[in-house]
Image: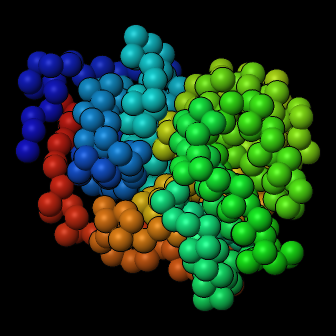
Amino acid sequence: MSQPYSASGAVPLRHARGGDDSGPRIARIETFTTPLVGFVRVTTRDGAIGWGQVSPYNSDITCQVLHRSVAPWALGRGMGALEDIVAQVPLREHKYPGTYLCRALAGFETAAWDWRGRSLDLPVASLLGGDPGPIRAYASSMRRDITPADEARRMQDLRDRHGFDAFKVRVGAECGQDRDEWDGRTEEIVPTMRRAMGDDAHLLVDANSGFLPERAIAVGRMLQDHGYEHYEEPCLYWELEQTASVNAALSIEVAGGEQDWDLVNWRRMIDMRAVDIVQPDILYVGGMIRAMQVARMGHAAGLPCTPHAANLSMVTLFTMHLLRAVPNAGRYLEFSIEGDDYYPWQRGLFRNDPYAVADGRVSVTDAPGWGVEISPEFLARAQYQVTEEQP
């Protein structure tokens, strides 16, 4: 067990000022992490707890940031100050902005929402102004190492077994600068999926920043010709002008934003109409409060919100609750179809399964908080660290 930072002298405990400090005070923030996934437990002085998660991948690094740059601003505050803490952390840590700070903030913030839900015996969706219930999902492939024919057969099986009617596949190569995963794969998979799934299937693609504008537009026109409806991240995501030029040239809906953590950049993206669909990732952007801010910005501009949720850790569960609460929820929830063979680190994360699919839908239950329990076996083998409030 690590010592609290205030005891070690590395970083003194600090308290942000302002906001509502009502409710039980935050006494302890613990992390349980591997390099690939990390969970966060928040405990108040009365012993009540809540569970959250930092973003997957380099989660051990992110948890270090949480203890250094987030926990000192939260400990000792009342749970009523959550919104103020989320607003204050980027200000107090202004010399260290960026994705790691937001990924760490999300771990604390999502745990605090679970605490609130458990304390009020309500699902988080209800706390956000929504309610529990079903959500239509699309089957989302994460693979480019698969042939178009095999991908189509995989999607047909998912349709027949689970009732999915919407499907997303990958085109181009990730940040490929017009390269494909192999020559001709994009031109093959686009018509193959349409033939295999039929005219009634709703088809989406993700380019993962794969193309320069000219090639992106050519691929987009091919997608339009085959009746696709969602074209995700066609150009380098940080080159907003490139994406805006592609969007202006096409009728297919262009989606993006999964990587973006900066709310100023989000406003710019929306104002310039770079995208038709906003896709915040709750764990990349800094948690539920900041993701809801992005959704509201999109709603004000008439844009739907279809968040990024690319694995079956807690991020998909968080997204389910958000989609049950925002007025501009997109048509679907992104639902990764990759199992433990592709993502071995997903194996055994939860005691209960929050991701049962029926008729192409998953459901937010009326269980308190996030409605999930972390596996004790995972916690026992994870790297543990704690930062505690000092007397």
Residue 318 as seen in the image, left or right of residue 332: left
Residue 200 as seen in the image, left or right of residue 263: right
Examine the rendered structure and indicate whether residue 70 appears above or below residue 218. Answer: above
Quarter residue 268 falls in = top right
Residue 186 vs residue 248, the one in the foreground: 186
Q: Position of residue 70 (x, y in %)?
A: 35, 29
Residue at position x 53%, y 69% in the image: 337
Residue at position x 20%, y 19% in the image: 11
Quarter residue 63 falls in = top left
Residue at position x 64%, y 53% in the image: 184
Q: What is the quadrant of the C terminus in the image?
A: top left
Residue 39 vs residue 87, the one in the foreground: 39
Residue 104 vs residue 276, the one in the foreground: 276
Residue 116 vs residue 203, the one in the foreground: 203
Residue 23 as seen in the image, left or right of residue 233: left
Number of numbered discs on residues: 0
Examine the rendered structure and indicate whether residue 259 appears above or below residue 157. Answer: above
Residue at position x 71%, y 55% in the image: 187
Q: Residue furthest top?
A: 95
Residue 363 as seen in the image, left or right of residue 317: right
Q: Position of residue 162 (x, y in %)?
A: 62, 84
